[in-house]
Image: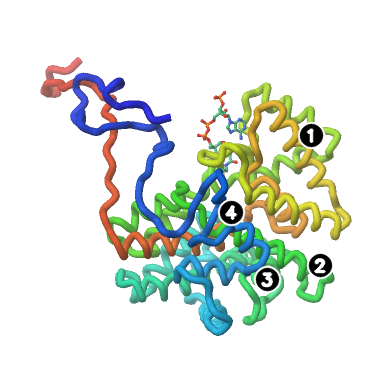
Amino acid sequence: MTTPLMAQTPPHNPIPDIPSYSPGLEGVIAGESALCLVDEGDRGLRYRGYAVTELAEQSSFEEVAFLLLHGKLPTQQELEEFRAHLQQTRTYPDLVDTLLRAMPPTAHPMDILRSAVSLLGILDPEANDHAHLSNMRKAVRLLGQVPLITGRAYQLMHGKQGGQPDSSMSTAETLLVLLTDRKPDDAVFTMMARVLDVSLILYAEHELNASTFAARVAASTLTDLYGAITAAIATLKGPLHGGANEAVARMFIEIGSQDRAEEWVHNALKRKQRIMGFGHRVLKKGDIRSAIIKRHAEQLSNICGDTRWFNIATTVDRIMQEEKGLHPNLDFYTAVVYLLMGIPQDWYTPVFVCSRLSGWCAHVIEQQDHNRLIRPRALYTGPPPQSYVPIDQRH
Ligand SMILES: CC(C)(COP(=O)(O)OP(=O)(O)OC[C@H]1O[C@@H](n2cnc3c(N)ncnc32)[C@H](O)[C@@H]1OP(=O)(O)O)[C@@H](O)C(=O)NCCC(=O)NCCS
């Protein structure tokens, strides 16, 4: 709700000419972007004008990343070149490997990724060039490097020799091989890789969410792309944002079986606990991405012969709609598919990073191509003007 500032302005407010104030910037238009339309009405969710429902059905994550960065769908040849670029960049400097090996076992995976991206920036001689083409090259490098760093960090932390991705693999296949015990010749591997690919498409971009806004604020100071992405990763970590998908999986594990779900949710609501994976700052009538991933979650559960997580999820979903009128967001049924794939919970948000990186980079480039420093104002709520008292006269 937007509250007129004048109604709340204390007499000493130094910025009386600012017309409105909305806590948490709810409903505030904070910038322009040609990347993503988030509309609860007929227009739906669109990346560069294309409906996410169609992209999830027909395209691949790589195609969507190209679309976000270049503003157009690739031709077959452009897509092949883009994939080849990503595959060539699927490597990282030795110093990043040293950093990953030096991480204590208690390190949070998102903090590891944040530190690794920061180090990539230190090591990139092109880091401080904000020209469009330079930023595009860095974006492609990051899209190639970060999934590999994510998987290697996991394997090092857990002492896994693990699978080695083949250089021709997609982002989804690379993550599946590195983060799970799945083998490419496993009967359900192809199906799982496709569902993971769909989840990467759905996670790729969502307008001015908190992490993207953090990236754009950083980029608007003309800091480097790596710095902006580091800020975005730090922001995505929070459980009210990207960290929700891990929290949902932990909730399903704690509930354990469908027959316990109803009582568990009622008890949690009695304690005024927030149920992760429900609600959205913008999408109050439901999240189309949740409906898409729910369909895949049901199919994959049937194929795997394991409907336990899906059944718990649908029960929690029903109770939340009955009791709170709240709809599941993308993180909710995504937890079902990641549980089925065997991705370790702590690594769900890093998988989200591997996808949202495409949207973040496109936003940083858009910001720096048409830059204006982002510097809003605050509604002052501190004390009225006071006279300085020398220290020996204070009590
Ligand atoms: C995403 C989120 C932060 C959006 O919040 P918001 O638009 O600012 O909504 P508010 O925090 O003002 O909540 C409005 C009301 O709904 C309730 N609510 C919102 N999300 C809830 C949830 N997940 N579980 C239980 N209650 C919830 C709040 O308690 C509040 O109730 P009240 O008015 O009785 O106090 C919030 O829905 C949430 O915390 N969700 C869980 C985390 C999550 O899934 N994050 C991923 C987002 S994509």
Name which residue lies at 41% across and 54% down.
231
Q: Nearer the viewer, residue 28 or 23?
A: 28
Residue wearing tag 4: 349
Name which residue lies at 65% across and 23% down.
271
Disc 4 packing (10 Å; few <14; some 14–19; many ≥20): many
Mark 4 secondary-structure assignment: helix
Name which residue lies at 45% across and 64% down.
117
Which x, y percent locates residue 3? Answer: 36, 27
Residue wearing tag 2: 188
Q: Which residue type does callout 2 highlight?
A: Val
Q: Which residue type does callout 3 highlight?
A: Glu
Residue wearing tag 1: 261
Which x, y percent locates residue 310? Answer: 79, 47
Mark 3 secondary-structure assignment: helix
Which x, y percent locates residue 30? Answer: 36, 46
Q: Earlier in the sequence, mark 4 or mark 1?
A: 1
Q: Marks 3 and 1: in contact by CB < 8 Å?
A: no
